[in-house]
Amino acid sequence: MSERPEEPNKASDAESLLPIDEHIEEGHDAEGRKVRHRGVYLLPNLFTTANLFAGFYSIINAMNGNFYVAAAAVFVAMVLDGLDGRVARLTNTQSAFGAEYDSLSDMVAFGVAPALLAFEWGLGSLGKVGWMVAFIYVAGAALRLARFNTQVGKADKRYFIGLASPAAAGVVAGTIWACTDHGLMGADMPMLMVFLVALLVAASGVLMVSNIKYNSFKELDIKGRVPFVAILVVVLVFAVVFSDPPRVLLVIFLAYAASGPVQYLMHLRRRKTVQ
C-alpha cells in the first residue's frame, strides 16, 4: 500500500519561487505599523554596485600585473563607498538589503582586493609567509565588517572601533601604488622592503579588529553653511592630492592609521599621571 505524499506548503513554495526583483523587506511606517516593501532602492545600490565593480576590477588588474591601475581602483571604490551611504541618507532610501549589500561589496573592495594586490606585487616571494600575511588582512577585514554590522545603532557614531576597512585598504593600496611608482615590484626587490610591506599589511589587518578608537568624522555637517575660506581649503587639498596621488594618499592614510594607537598611548599616559 503506497503512502500518499504530503501536500507541499503552497505559501512557502510561493515565497521560495520569488524572482530576484520580487525581494520583500519588512519595515515600519511613521505610525509604527509593520509594512512590507517589494523590490530594492535603485540609486544607492547603483553606487554600491560600482564599488563592487571597482574592487573586482582591482583584482583583475592585480592578477595581470597592472599594480598601478589596481591600486587606483581601490581608491575609486573608496569614493563610491562614501557616496552610497550618503546618497541613501539624503534620499531617505536606507534599507537592510542595502546595508548587507554594502558590507559584501566592502569585503571585496577593501578586504580581498588589497590583500591580493599586495600578494601579487611582492608578498608571494615570501612563500607561505606571504599568503599567511595576506590572509591575516582578509580575515581582519571580514571580522571588522561583521563587528561593525552588529554595532550599528549601539556604538558612538563619533568613533570607529578599530581601523575602518577603507582606511586599511588605503594604507595597503597606497603603499603598493607608491612603490610601483618607484619601480619597486616583483622578485627583484630587496627582501627587507618586502618584509616591511608584509609587516604593514599584517598590522593593518590587526588594527581593524583592535579596540582602538578612530575618529569617524561623522559629526561634520556637510549640508550646513561654512565660511568661504573652507572652500579654499578644499580646493587646496584637491590640488595637493592630485599633484602626487600615490605619495600624498599614502601619507594621509598612514597618518590616520597611526592616529588611533597614538591617541590610545596618550590616553594611557594621562591616566597613569592622574593615578
Image: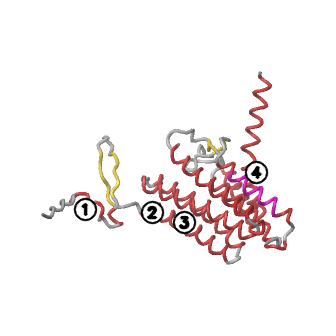
The 10 Å Cα crowd at callout 3, few under 14, some 14 to 19, many 20 or more, is: many
Q: Which residue is mark 4?
A: 255
Mark 3 lies on a secondary structure that is helix
Residue 274, given in percent of the width and then of the height, sits at: 77, 23
Give whichever of discs 2 and 4 has the lower sequence position. Answer: 2
Q: Position of residue 2 (x, y in %)?
A: 15, 64
Q: Marks 3 and 2, how far apart in space?
A: 15 Å
* Residue sitting nearer the eye, 251 or 183: 183
Q: Residues within 10 Å of mark 2 (few under 14, many from 20)?
A: few
Q: Which mark is residue 43?
A: 2
User: Which residue is label 3 attached to?
Assistant: 52
Image side of residue 95 versus residue 47, left or right = left
Q: Point out the residue furthest to the left here.
A: 1
Query: Do tag 3 and tag 2 residues touch (Cβ < 8 Å)?
Result: no
Residue stretch rendered in magenta on the structure = 194-205
Q: Nearer the viewer, mark 4 or mark 3?
A: 3
